[in-house]
Image: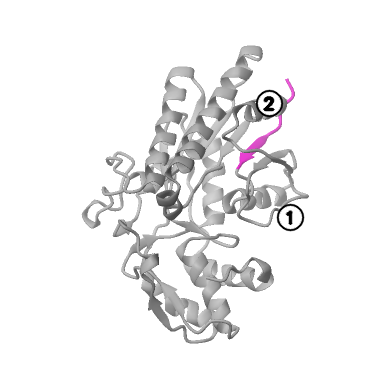
């Protein structure tokens, strides 16, 4: 049975593109990646992987791809991944995240009808948003045993994705890892606080913007660099216990407002701010911080990138990709 080593859904997103970069740098070239409405410039990775357009909501296409390539590892990263978007498009968010996940597992079951020995590892990119109102100062860093009480449709969709993965493992013996990913950012990221902040900071330094729109500056977040996240996901595919759930989170928390002085130092100008009510969510976790003891015990994962390096690299990315800087 011919197999390819790795299939990445959502390869056109920040995490998928960095995973291709990391694996290509060590010589791995048997990577299949699918994308649909990518959020990054996929030309950055087009020569490093076999890229195929595929919407994970279409079960037949997913099934054909898994039947053709029979990947040993499936990194299921494809998602509608923005909580703010989920308020406006809840049905679409649930369809992509839950139905898309079911389609991956159903495709594996179909392949097994012809190839009973097919036994891939599926790593499902779940989210800290599943914890929702369990994320309180007295309950953090939060462990994987905490109640799942999501506060927006995106979080609900990720709970569904998470539990679907578990039941396919339990009932169909499909090996899987559920990775609950906390706030992660880095070069190529769009639509999170540091992506918006770094883009606005670059525009202010270029004289194209007078001040920076901000939302709630008092939120507290642990922040992980995307390259550290990719390392954790790859380690879990290799060393994680099938069926288990693992938090992936940075080890240090930051008040969002305290990141602005770092931005000012990196762009070399003062950054005036003003609160934009449209950036305030109907509900917002006051702190997002996860316990990663289980991850470290299983894989010996450690962070390699500090917050200043992440911010510096994001600013450099926007300066070298000005066509991607949005008018925000």
Task: Write down the region rendered in magenta.
Answer: 1-9
Give the image quarter of residue 313.
bottom right
The residue lying at 35 percent from left, 70 percent from top is 217
Q: Residue furthest left?
A: 138
Q: Is residue 249 visible?
A: no
**Residue under numbered circle 2:** 64
Q: Is residue 309 visible?
A: yes
Relative depth, front residue between 160 and 24: 160
The residue tagged with tag 2: helix, strand or loop?
helix
The residue lying at 21 percent from left, 54 percent from top is 138
**Residue under numbered circle 1:** 43
Residue 63, percent from left and from top: 64, 26
Residue 131, percent from left and from top: 32, 45
Q: Please determine whether, in this image, residue 174 is positioned above or below residue 144.
A: above
Q: Please determine whether, in this image, residue 162 is positioned above or below residue 212.
A: above
Relative depth, front residue between 46 and 60: 60
Is 8 part of what is drawn in magenta? yes
The residue lying at 56 percent from left, 49 percent from top is 230
Residue 123, percent from left and from top: 52, 36
Asked if residue 16 lies left or right of residue 52, the reply is left
The residue lying at 71 percent from left, 27 percent from top is 3
Q: Mark 2: few, some, or many residues within 10 Å (few <14, many ≥20)?
A: some
Residue 70, percent from left and from top: 67, 26
Asked if residue 280 lies left or right of residue 44, the reply is left
Asked if residue 251 lies left or right of residue 1, the reply is left
């Amino acid at each position: 049975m011919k197999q390819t080593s790795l299939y990445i859904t959502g390869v056109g997103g920040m995490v998928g593109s960095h995973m291709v970069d990391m694996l290509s740098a060590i010589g791995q070239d048997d990577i299949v990646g699918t994308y649909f409405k990518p959020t990054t410039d996929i030309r950055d990775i087009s020569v490093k992987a076999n890229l195929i357009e595929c919407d994970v909501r279409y079960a037949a296409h997913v099934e054909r791809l898994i039947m053709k390539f029979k990947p040993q590892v499936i990194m299921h990263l494809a998602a509608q991944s923005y909580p703010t978007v989920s308020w406006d498009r809840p049905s679409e968010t649930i369809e992509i995240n839950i139905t898309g996940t079911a389609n991956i597992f159903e495709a594996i079951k179909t392949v097994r009808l012809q190839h009973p020995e097919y036994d891939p590892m599926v790593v499902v990119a779940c989210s800290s948003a599943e914890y929702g109102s369990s994320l309180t100062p007295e309950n953090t860093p939060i462990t994987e045993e905490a109640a799942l009480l999501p506060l927006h449709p995106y979080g609900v969709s990720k709970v569904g994705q998470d539990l679907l993965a578990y039941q396919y493992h339990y009932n169909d013996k499909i090996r899987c890892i559920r990775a609950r990913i906390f706030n992660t950012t880095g070069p190529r990221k769009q639509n999170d606080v540091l992506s918006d902040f770094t883009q606005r900071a670059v525009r202010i330094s270029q004289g194209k913007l007078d001040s920076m729109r901000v939302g709630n500056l008092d939120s507290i977040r642990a922040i992980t660099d995307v390259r550290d996240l990719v390392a954790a996901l790859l380690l879990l595919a290799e060393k994680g216990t099938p069926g288990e759930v693992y938090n992936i989170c940075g080890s240090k928390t930051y008040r969002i407002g305290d990141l602005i002085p770092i931005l000012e130092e990196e762009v070399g100008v003062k950054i005036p701010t003003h609160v934009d009510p449209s950036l305030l969510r109907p509900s917002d976790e006051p702190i997002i911080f996860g316990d990663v003891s289980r991850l470290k015990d299983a894989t010996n994962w450690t962070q390699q990138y500090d917050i200043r390096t992440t911010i510096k690299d994001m600013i450099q990315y926007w300066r070298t990709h000005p066509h991607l800087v949005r008018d925000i």
